[in-house]
Image: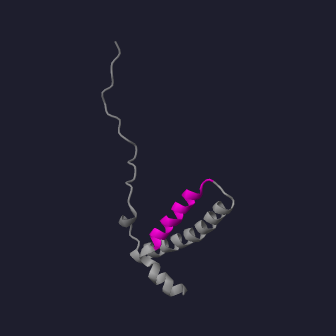
Amino acid sequence: MEAVRTEQVQPEAQAPEWRSIDDQRTPPVVRNCSAECGALVCLGDLIHVFALNVTYDVPVKLLSFHLLLLSLFVLAPDLKRLADFFF
């Protein structure tokens, strides 16, 4: 009969812990501005995608419309400030 090894195998290195965005040390102003800028770019792109989907009768109109609404949802807290800035 063969002998069974009973020693534990130690990991070589521990995996880094995952952190959320709030745990990082970036100032809140930078996070808010980057989310707002990203949502504005996404909104402009999705308006174009949704218009093309509707005019060419592509079957993914609902998905592009939902993504358009989601970008508006992200921008909702800042809509008044954006309207004052652009108009």
Residue 2 coordinates in the image, percent (x, y)? 35, 15
Image height check: is 35 above or below 5?
below
Q: Judge by depth and name the residue closer to the eye, 1 or 82.
A: 82
Tell me the magenta residue range: 59-75
The colour scheme applied to this rendered structure is one colour
In reply to whether residue 66 is colored magenta, the answer given is yes
Residue 51 coordinates in the image, percent (x, y)? 64, 66
Q: Residue at x 38, y 48 (%)?
A: 14
- How many labels sit on residues? 0
Q: Judge by depth and name the residue closer to the eye, 14 or 44.
A: 44
The C terminus, quarter of image? bottom right
Residue lying at the far right in this picture: please name it: 56
Horizontally, residue 68 falls left or right of residue 53, namely: left
Residue lying at the far top in this picture: please name it: 1
In reply to whether residue 61 is colored magenta, the answer given is yes
Image height check: is 49 above or below 17?
below
The N terminus, quarter of image? top left
Q: Judge by depth and name the residue closer to the eye, 65 or 22.
A: 65
Secondary structure mostly seen in the magenta stretch: helix
Quarter location, residue 24: bottom left
Residue 72 coordinates in the image, percent (x, y)? 49, 70
Q: Residue at x 41, y 75 (%)?
A: 77
Q: Residue at x 44, y 78 (%)?
A: 78
Q: Residue at x 56, y 68 (%)?
A: 42
Residue 37 coordinates in the image, percent (x, y)? 52, 74
Horizontally, residue 32 falls left or right of residue 68, namely: left
